Each structure stands twice: as C-alpha cells, then as structure tokens.
Amino acid sequence: MSKKDCGNHDTFWCSCKIKKKYKKILIGLAILIVLVLLAILIVWLALRPTKPQYYLQDMIVYNLNLTGPTYLSTTIQVTLKSHNPNDRIGIYYDKLDVYAIYKGQQITIPTELPTQYQGHDDVSIWSPYLYGIDVPLAPYLTVALEQDEAAGYVLIQVRVEGRLRWKVGTWISGHYHIDVNCPAFLTVGGYGASDHGFHYKPITQCNVEV
C-alpha cells in the first residue's frame, strides 16, 4: 500500500498533508487581503483628502437682547459657504448642526442643515436661522454682554458640528466628525448696522477640524 492511498497505517501522514494544504490556502488568503489593504492605503495616501473650507459670509442679528437679569433671547441669520478643494474626492455631509456661542456658552439651539453630497471642487451655501429664547446665562456673562455692547463690539462664535464621509471613485469611507468654528465680530451702531444696531464684518475663514 502506497502513501498516496492513505491507508490505515498512514492516517497521521494524511492528516499532516491536509493541514499543510489548508495552511497554504490560509496563507494565500492572508496575502491577498494584505495586498488589497495595501492598495487601498496607497490610493488613500495618493489622494489624501484636504479638509473642506468654510467661510462665514454674512450675519444678520435680528435680536440679541437680555430678557431678564440672567436670560438672553437671540435671533440670527448666518450665511455659510463651504468649499470642497479636492479634485478627486467627494464629500457626503450626513449631518450638520449650526449654533451660536458667546464666551463659551451656547446661546441658540442647534439648527440642522440639509444633508447633501458635495462633488469635486464644489461650493455649498447655507443661510439658516439660529434661535435662542430665554436662554439662561451665568451672571458674569450678562455683565460681560452689557460691557461689550457699551464698548461697541461683541464677538460671537458660529459653530458647525456633524459627520461626513469621503468618496473616492466608488469607494466611500466611514464617518468622520467635523467641527467648524467661525468667529463673528459684531460692531454696535455706526454705518451699515442692522435695525437692531449690529454690523458684521468678516474677519478670516473658519477653523475646520476633521
């Protein structure tokens, strides 16, 4: 009886042969997976995405008034511009919330922007309204706001938070968190001020973290 016949006396040899066969298959699959992942990594590094650029183009203050000793009511319309600077990478915005902050405290509820896809080198513009009714403020913030208005300027931060995905060809990445911070310097009174006394002058583009 030959070893190829795998008789009763060669059971151990046959078992070793089967194990070696499966081992070669597993090694082959592992090499294939590594090569695929390496190819994806090379493409990703070659097309490394540049984070989107955001600009706060305009801000109209309809209401920014203390409604009590420690309460603030706010109505603001902002115009945000987003630019995808990538030539080969698209962006899916799955969720974006916009709200206003004064000296570290949120003064409006989040306003959700519509979900959308931003293609290569595309530009998106949103003009949401931000609302805050009788928002409780820390006592020192009411004093600070009164002092800022008396001095003729108020600094508001417009924040955008949400999730995005990158699209390269037919491949779509997992979710990434995006955090945008736009400083809005408001002057009180003077030429160009709104009916409620505030005038917005753009400073710089927004800071974006992905």
Image: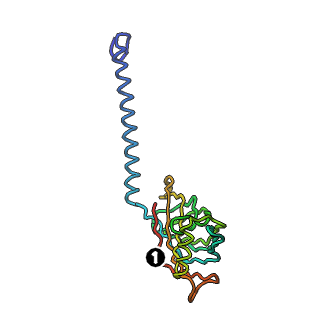
In the rendered image, residue 210, in percent from the top left (x then y), is placed at 46, 60
Q: Please state the horizontal and vertical placement of residue 86, each as a whole percent of the image.
A: 45, 66
Point 56% across, 89% down: residue: 191
For residue 195, side relative to residue 39 (left or right): right
Within 10 Å of disc 1 (Cα), the crowding (few <14, some 14-19, many 20+) is: few
The amino acid sitting under disc 1 is Thr
Q: Position of residue 93 (x, y in %)?
A: 55, 61
Residue at 51% x, 74% y: name it: 155
Does 33 sit above or below residue 165?
above
For residue 37, side relative to residue 167 (left or right): left
Query: Which of the two residues, 62 or 22, is positioned nearer the viewer here?
Result: 62
Left or right of 189 in this view: 24:
left
Residue toward you, 165 or 208 = 208
Q: Check the image and tell me how it is coloured.
A: rainbow
Q: Quick one: SS at disc 1?
A: loop
Please give the residue where the numbered disc 1 appears in the rendered image.
204
Relative depth, front residue between 37 and 163: 163
Q: Residue at x 33, y 17 (%)?
A: 13
Q: Note whether 188 is above or below 166 in the view shown.
A: below
